[in-house]
Image (cartoon, rainbow, N blue to C red):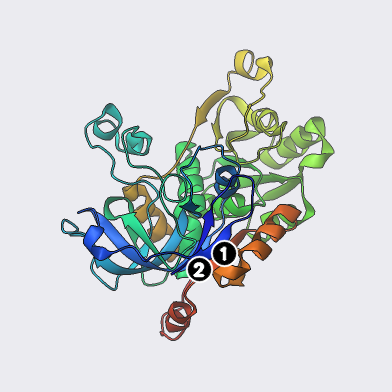
Amino acid sequence: MLAAQVVEFNQPYKIHHVPVPSPSTLHPNDLLVKVAVASLCHTDSMVTAGKFHSKLPITGSHEGAGTVAAIGSSVKNFKIGDRVMCGLKTHRCGRCSDCRGPENYRNYCPNNDGDLGIKRDGAFAEYLVADANESNLLPDKVSFETAAPLACAGRTIYRGVAQAKLEKGQWLGLVGSGGGLGHLGIQFAKALGLRVVGIDARDEGLELTRKFGADAAIDARKGTEEIINEVEKVTGGLRCHATVNISDAQTAAATACAITMMHGRLVQIAQPDQICIPMAELIFRDIRIEGSLLCTARQGQEMLKVVSENNISVKTNSFYGLKKLPELIELAHSGRMAGKGIIIVDEDAIKKENEIDTKLV
């Protein structure tokens, strides 16, 4: 099968043929998935840079969707032919304090076999192996092209919005609102009855923020004081009840705190090496800061239900075939890409979806 692999850090992917995983070697809880669509994530650049010390060679992408081609001996929740959004985690231990603690702690299990595309081969291939316990059955209305970016970007921002713990009618800020995660965050927040202030520093990002329904789109290039003025004008002097920061920019976390009301919550999703926040935001304004990682499998199924019922869409930039991956990466690094970049791996699967009567999102 064709696959795009990291064979040397800080070098382009090697696109070449590798063996198809054998159904006979599947872990009892595993799925062999024929990949329909694979999506590019910021994490992929971290893998190629060696930040996760991945064992090479490794097939990239932890955002994949496709059709179940074979199942492990213990799999009960999937059958061959099912359409699936692949889970990232594999083989959690089930014994540690995170696995046995609150449901939303389970993705923090330190005793697992690694994430797809980071420690295990991922979705930039014609087939991949995923953990059935971490994967999700696709609703009839959700297409492969929508599902693949949701595998990480969707799961990440959905949990961030949920972790803000807001009630209908309250204000949610999104710093970095015009990117792959941000435009999904706007739609999830609106589906949950929240009002949204989107902040972005790119013209393309601001356009996407408006397009996907934010109540206000504010240009981060105006500076903190003007941003605060505009947020207060929109919110009636309140600022935001909570803010989710999706931007790696050096000043983004400070901006997210500044637009949040006193005693409000900042949910940090972006992963820069250092998060810089003025002391006064913590001490004198009592901003509470939490990190957020990913949905659990149960939350992922809940997210897909929200997507299906609210016709939530993903802004995608489609490239056909794994050999087009270098072109996608070039676009992503240009700063001009709005939304998510995806590779159509199985064109026949996409054609088959388009032939059914159900209108897909």
Circle 2: residue type: Glu
Quadrant of the frame with the N terminus: bottom left
Residue at the spot x=83%, y=39% of the render?
A: 222
Per the rendering, the mark at residue 69 is none
Per the model, the C-alpha gap separating discs 1 and 2 is 8 Å
User: For the residue carrying disc 2, how many other residues have a C-alpha within 10 Å: few (<14), some (14-19), or many (20+)?
Assistant: many
Q: Where residue 294 sits: x, y (%)?
A: 44, 43
The residue labelled by disc 2 is: 145
Discs 1/2, front: 1
Disc 2 on helix, strand or loop? helix
Residue at the spot x=44%, y=68% of the render?
A: 126
Q: Pointer 1 and pointer 2: residues touching (CB < 8 Å)?
A: yes
The residue labelled by disc 1 is: 342
Question: Is 65 drawn above or below residue 243 in the view shown?
Answer: below
Front-most of residues 36 and 326: 326
* Quadrant housing residue 315: bottom right
In the picture, measured across the screen, residue 65 lies left or right of residue 322, that is left
Q: Where residue 278 sits: x, y (%)?
A: 69, 19
